[in-house]
Amino acid sequence: MQLLNRLTKLFQSPRQARSLTMAWYCSGSTNTELIENLFKVGLIKNERVKEAMLGVDRAHYAPSRPYSDSPQPIGHGATISAPHMHGHACEYLIEHLQPGARVLDIGSGSGYLTHVLANLVTGPNGSGGQGQVIGIDHIRELVELAQGNMNKSEQGWELQDSGKVKLITADGRLGWKENAPYDAIHVGAAAETLHPVLIEQLKAPGRLFIPVESEENGSSLTANGGQYIWVVDKRADGSIQKEKVFQVSYVPLTDAP
Ligand code: SAH
């Protein structure tokens, strides 16, 4: 408890401090053990998210320590996010990840979350009809890596072959107009601003999950990254609601190297 209090002060967010302390206990020796542990401690709460994550073996996406609840390098300065962060992202978006939904995953990196999102919107055995996930990364080598990672399972291969998952090399700050509007947009790298074009590409209703650099960046309060997740809702009547939810540490959403 003392440790949790100290981490809470350090990170100014009980949720993030709790995630960090819990993360040390959640790692598993198999994919199932990892996901079950995250569920047991409440870092994943939603049954559909749990099922979708059980359906994707992280060993296909994280080259070292795949079942550890921590981010791992995947090359080109990118990381695969920690499993509990993938879980949080899905849970914040879950109402908009019904079978048949259309999703944009910006900064798709390893392709892991793209695959989990596809499990949610295409339903079991691809039954989600029109469900589709577009994954975008601006580094071509990482797009190829994600495609190869997905091809390691028959289901991942089929998702790509059927066009239910498309992995594209592009600047995600512009969204992806061709397949817009989206029920849900996930951004996996920290943006400098809440890009209005991404909000434009949301359906009504629709939700954007995006880490954004804090304006107070550089102050002692934000010495460990100064980024916050923002959840932006476009309501059915087209009105926009923005909420800053918790502090995080993501690689930046930048110009292509
Ligand atoms: N969700 C991914 C996160 C990868 S790290 C995973 O868990 O595997 C963030 C990714 O964002 C990196 O792959 C990086 O190449 C990508 N990225 C950074 N800036 C970008 C931009 N402007 N457009 C598209 N992708 C970008």
Image: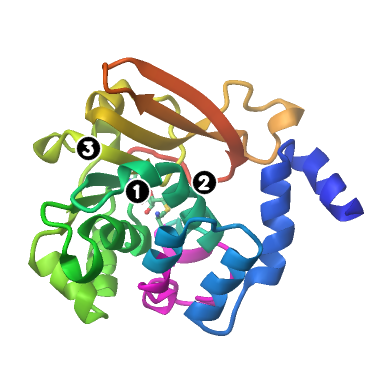
For the record, the magenta segment spans 53-76
When asked about the image quadrant of residue 248, the answer is top right
The CB of the residue at mark 1 lies under 8 Å from ligand 1:
yes
Q: Which mark is residue 182?
A: 3
> Pointer 3: residues within 10 angstroms few (<14), some, or many (20+)?
many
Residue 187 visible in rendering = no
Query: Can you say whether 141 is above or below 215 in the image?
Result: below
Looking at the image, tell me whether mark 1 or mark 2 is earlier in sequence order: 1
**In the displayed structure image, the side of residue 50 where residue 144 appears, left or right:** left
Q: Secondary structure at mark 2?
A: loop
Looking at the image, tell me whether mark 2 or mark 3 is earlier in sequence order: 3
Query: Can you say whether 183 is above or below 119 in the image?
Result: above
Q: Which residue is mark 2?
A: 250
The CB of the residue at mark 2 lies under 8 Å from ligand 1:
yes
Residue drawn at (70%, 70%), measured in percent from left and top? 25
Looking at the image, tell me whether mark 3 or mark 1 is earlier in sequence order: 1
Q: Position of residue 155 (x, y in %)?
A: 21, 75
